[in-house]
DNA sequence: ATGATTTTGCGAATCGTTCGCAAATAAGGC
DNA sequence: GCCTTATTTGCGAACGATTCGCAAAATCAT
């Protein structure tokens, strides 16, 4: 049974996420809490992030090293992200035509696109 | 100093990759070798995969669980992949306009697209 | 406040991956 | 082939991120 208890650790973790609008690892969040003198265990950070993710408040992303990172983000309405390699800043991107995306990113965000990943998932002919 | 020694473990690992044209984890490759009575240590599997990747013969991909998987694939000429959720079959996809991609996947590969991931990387306005 | 339920902290366990080092193997020259 | 040298291998230990078990603490409803 899930109960959405309002607890101090949950508020503190949400606070860190709200203050830092980019993808953070559990360890980074834990460190930020320590610096704020908030004594929250790493286990609780993990459990709270999973809780927030299951509520749809947080998006999880695997970084290039395969580590999980988390950010406040509504995945309900499907979209993608433009992530700055330098500072980690995240801008939302809808998926219109790919050809126009680079141009649009530069025009609307001043974002200089220099790389992208795409992956298509579905069912192949012989598996249908 | 890198020397490209030709060894039995390397040939056997490449053989597994050649026989199975989809993304395989180190553990899967190791298991395939065991079944073929090839005694190769898991460490060597990892080291050989990294060696092949650095040579540009193998592409690495993090699956949804964050595990590394590997496939023979030339990343030199930039492209993407359509991966079957059922059998793991991989088809190459070039990055033309995204709008036409779903249609093209169906027409040319019989691939029924039902999901995709994209990520854009670059430098944001304030970091330039 | 009381009791039922959930969450937390702690440490141990797990899993994939990497590392250190001695033994085995490959390449090159004789 | 044989020797020398550089590289690779196997093994087990170490590692880092994540998960788990369980008793203690916190939350909520009455
Ligand atoms: Zn930036
Ligand atoms: Zn999309
Ligand atoms: Zn298939
Ligand atoms: Zn591309």
Image: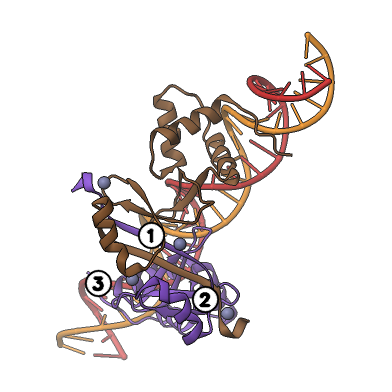
Chain colours: A brown, B purple, C orange, D red
Question: What is the quadrant of the N terminus of chain A in the image?
Answer: top right
Horizontal relation, residue A88 to residue A49: left or right: left
Q: What residue sits right under mark 2 in the picture? A: B39
Q: Quadrant location of the C terminus of chain A? A: bottom right
Q: For mark 1, give the secondary structure.
A: strand
Is B70 displayed left or right of B37 in the figure? left
State the residue position of label 1. Answer: B119
Pointer 2 or 3: first along the chain: 3
Nearer-N-terminus badge (1/3): 3
Residue tagged by mark 3? B2
Q: Position of residue A10 (x, y in %)?
A: 55, 31
Ligand 4 rendered quadrant: bottom left
In the picture provided, is A98 more to the left or to the right than C3?
A: left
| Horizontal and vertical percent position of residue B55 | 30, 75
**Which chain is indicated by disc 1?**
B
Location of residue A127 in the rendering, given as x and y in whole percent from the top left corner: 61, 81
Q: Residue at x 41, y 80 (%)?
A: B92
- Closer to the camera in the image, B104 or B6: B104
Q: Is residue D16 above or below residue B49?
A: above
Within 10 Å of the Cα at label 1, are there few (<14), some (14-19), or many (20+) other Cα atoms? some
Could you give the CA–CA distance between mark 2 and mark 1, rounded to whole angstroms?
40 Å
- Marks counted in the figure total 3
Seen at 43% across and 27% down, the residue is A34
Q: CA distance from mark 2 to mark 3?
A: 24 Å
Protein chain holding label 3: B
* Label 2 residue SS: loop
């Amino acid at each position: 049974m899930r109960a959405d208890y309002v607890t101090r650790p949950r508020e503190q973790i949400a606070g860190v996420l709200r203050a830092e609008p980019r993808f953070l690892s559990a360890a980074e969040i834990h460190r930020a809490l320590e610096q704020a003198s908030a004594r929250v265990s790493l286990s609780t950070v993990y459990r709270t992030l999973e809780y927030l993710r299951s509520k749809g408040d947080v998006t999880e992303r695997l970084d290039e090293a395969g580590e999980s990172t988390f950010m406040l983000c509504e995945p309900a309405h499907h979209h993608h992200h433009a992530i700055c390699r330098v500072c980690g800043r995240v801008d939302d991107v809808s998926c219109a035509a790919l050809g126009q995306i680079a141009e649009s990113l530069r025009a609307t965000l001043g974002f200089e696109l220099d790389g992208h990943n795409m992956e298509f998932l579905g069912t192949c002919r012989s598996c249908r």
